[in-house]
Image: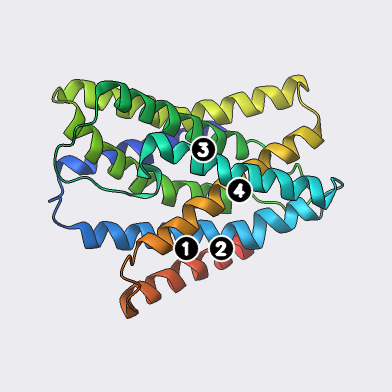
Amino acid sequence: MIFNSIVLFICAMVGGLLVYGLDKKEGINIKLILIFGGSYLFSITIIHILPELYQSEASGMSIGLFVLLGFFFQNFLEYFTSGVEHGHMHAHKHSHTSVAGYSLMIALCLHAFLEGTFLAYPNIFHDHGSKSGSLLIGVVLHKIPAALALMSVLTCQFDNKKFQIFLLVLFSLASPFGLIAGSYIKTIGFMEDAGLLFLFAFVGGNFLHISTTIFIESSPEHNWNFKRLLVSIGGAAVAVLAEMYV
């Protein structure tokens, strides 16, 4: 748990701090990173999360309903975040108020917290065969560009660099806190296995929304792009290899 928490924190911090060293005109490179992360996240949801959920003792209807709730809750979060969690970049100042900035932080931290709780239960579905390593990679691949995109917005909304980094630290701590909270809930038996399965289905719906939105918005003109196709196939291939060997 300590190792995973440190990895989650460092990756988010590194991803966010990259904004100070990157030329914001390099949007295509950021898009390719997002496509790779989105492809991995989508693939790991399809080949790992959903099969495990539907093989559990919970009813398929209940699982499906919570996946849908997670999917549309992520859509609701975008009302506050403007899609920052899957890489919407803002290269110049907008008329966002500080309240909107705080709402954005709350929404993104909630999402990151739920991601962390997911990693606390690698064996909740079965006594064997479930792995947290592949899920950790998926969360990390998503978190680095998400933190980069988040900081690109915060640097436009807030002029104080120390405050920007303070908000980045809060965001970076959200997933580790979720992992710690999930482990604590597991230890004290606060939540039954069925409740945890529904929570995971909810987060799985989050992942589906984020990953599919990345695919759609990576090519708003719907032009076929061989480089993006190769990157997305690469992300899926890494997901399959991670599921098999990690």
SS category of the residue bearing label 3? helix
SS category of the residue bearing label 4? helix
Q: Which residue is mark 4?
A: 205
Quadrant of the rendered structure where residue 180 is?
Answer: top right
SS category of the residue bearing label 1? helix
- Which numbered disc, 3 or 4, marks the residue that appears first in the sequence? 3
Q: Residues within 10 Å of mark 3 (few under 14, many from 20)?
A: some
Foreground: disc 4 or disc 1: 4
Q: Amino acid at mark 4?
A: Gly
Rounded to the nearest angstrom, the CA distance separating label 4 from label 2 is: 13 Å
Q: Which mark, by number, is residue 39?
A: 1
Q: Which mark, by number, is residue 4?
A: 3
Q: Residues within 10 Å of mark 2 (few under 14, many from 20)?
A: many
Q: Amino acid at mark 1?
A: Ser
* Circles 2 and 3 in contact, beta carbons < 8 Å: no
Q: Residue at x 43, y 69 (%)?
A: 232
- Which numbered disc, 2 or 3, marks the residue that appears first in the sequence? 3
Q: Residue at x 71, y 51 (%)?
A: 130
Rounded to the nearest angstrom, the CA distance separating label 1 from label 2 is: 6 Å
* Circles 1 and 2 in contact, beta carbons < 8 Å: yes
* Position of residue 140 measured from the top left corner of the image (x, y, whole percent): 44, 47
Rounded to the nearest angstrom, the CA distance separating label 2 from label 3 is: 21 Å
Q: Which mark, by number, is residue 43?
A: 2
Foreground: disc 1 or disc 3: 1
Question: Which quarter of the rendered picture does the N terminus lie within?
Answer: top right
